[in-house]
Amino acid sequence: MWPHRVIVLMNQGKNPTACPEGVLMALLFRSSVDSEARWKPQLTRLMPELEVRIWPEVGDPAEIDYALVWRPEPGLLASLPNLKLILSLGAGVDHILCDPELPANVPLVRLVDPYMTDAMSEYVALQVLRLHRQDLDYRAQQDAGIWRELDQKNAAERRVGILGAGALGQDAGRKLAALGFDVALWGRSPKTINGKACHAGAAELPALLGRSEILVCLLPLTDRTQAILNAGTLALLPRGAALVNAARGGHLVEEDLLAALASGQLSGAVLDVFRDEPLPAGHPFWRHPRVVVTPHVAAATHPPTAAPIILDNIRRFEAGRPLLNRVDPAQGY
Ligand code: NDP
Ligand code: OXD
């Protein structure tokens, strides 16, 4: 497809009505992990009037209206003087808010896609069941050729705590409860979900931790949640508890987890996210018998379902209608 602006400029001399002014929009796509091939066809099929430019082929920065990004280079967004809206290629926005030159006056929206929410809940259910049914122990027994039955509780007797009571935490909580688990959620502000009050705020974190035999982290990474999984908080879990972190590597103090596993305070951990990604070769997590590693795949973005949601926000912006899933930079999520 010809770049839209080029078509219009050529048309202007010949047939100025063929492509009216006002429909010209340019979006810059920049992802450090995803490919143009997965996104551009979806976006242009649904919004042909949108010219999709792929970084580093920015062209004239003044022509860029929208930026769809995952971990953009610091300063990239500030270099686009007429940027109207920043759209995150993920549910989290820490990868954008960490840019010290982020333009303060440009709204930012994150991606909330039911397809991703389902994927995250599948991941959480799989890993909670794995820990609940002592799969790490049975794997170790199999490696050693040991046939031994371990004591087993029912899901109703297993208390699961979820840090984060947002789009992902609520859905995972509902699905774990449907499996029978005794689930409690923790968020920033008080709320009642399915008739059950969530634990809220720093004051109620110890109570949530104290009941969580399996702790699932689904928080956004902010100044307040950075390193929230540390020696102090892990010590508040019941002895032998297990951790699932599918949020961000920055939530976890990795050395503190290793120490908690070594002391038996924690019996296992499933980690999808890491301080450094990809997880460096030789990192102790790779070969740790009580740690399961997955490569940040709990809920991957899915262009066929995400593109319409992203474009809906662009249409909303153009029509002056309220944006969906707008981020409050002051709160960090
Ligand atoms: P939401 O914004 O919908 O929910 C965030 C939740 O965290 C809210 O309940 C919020 O509380 C709570 N929260 C925020 N700050 C605090 C705090 N200081 N103390 C207590 N609670 C707090 O986010 P999502 O559920 O959509 O996503 C959560 C995170 O999951 C993303 O930010 C991303 O980092 C991660 N993620 C990981 C993926 C993966 O593949 N591994 C995929 C997708 C997302 P309140 O309800 O009061 O606002
Ligand atoms: C996200 C992620 O934030 O993929 O969407 O981690």
Image (tube, rainbow, N blue to C red):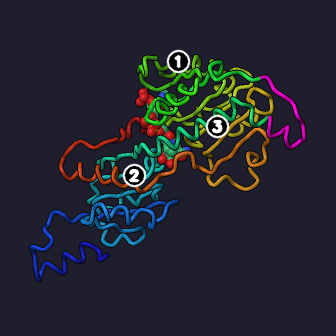
Quadrant in which residue 291 is drawn:
top right
Q: Amino acid at mark 1?
A: Glu
Left or right side of 132 for 43:
left
Q: Which numbered tag is attached to residue 204?
A: 1
* Nearest-to-viewer mark from 1 and 2: 2
The answer to whether 99 is drawn above or below residue 128 in the figure is below
If you read the primary sequence from the N terminus, does the residue marked by circle 3 or circle 2 appear first?
A: 3
**Marks 1 and 3, the one that precedes in the sequence:** 3
Q: Which residue is mark 3?
A: 127
Rounded to the nearest angstrom, the CA distance separating label 1 from label 3 is 25 Å
Within 10 angstroms of label 1, few (less than 14), some, or many (20 or more) residues?
A: some
Answer above or below: position of 315 versus 216.
below
Q: Is residue 242 shown in magenta?
A: no
Q: Which residues are magenta?
A: 138-151
What kind of element bears circle 1?
A: helix
- Residue type, numbered disc 3: Gln
In the drawing, what numbered circle is on residue 181? none
Looking at this view, is 79 or 301 the one in front? 301
Visible residue check, residue 15: yes
Quick one: quadrant of the N terminus?
Answer: bottom left
State the SS at label 3: helix
Q: Which residue is the site of mark 2?
A: 306
Residue drawn at (23%, 50%) of the image: 317
Q: Tag 3: Cα neighbours inside 10 Å, few (<14), some, or many (≥20)?
A: many
Please, is residue 13 above or below residue 315 in the view? Answer: below
Q: Residue at x 40, y 43 (%)?
A: 112
Task: For label 2, count other residues whose C-alpha is less than 10 Å away and answer few (under 14), some (14-19) or many (20+).
Answer: many
Residue under the image location 65 percent in, 48 percent down: 294
The verdict on label 2 being within 8 Å of ligand 2 is: no
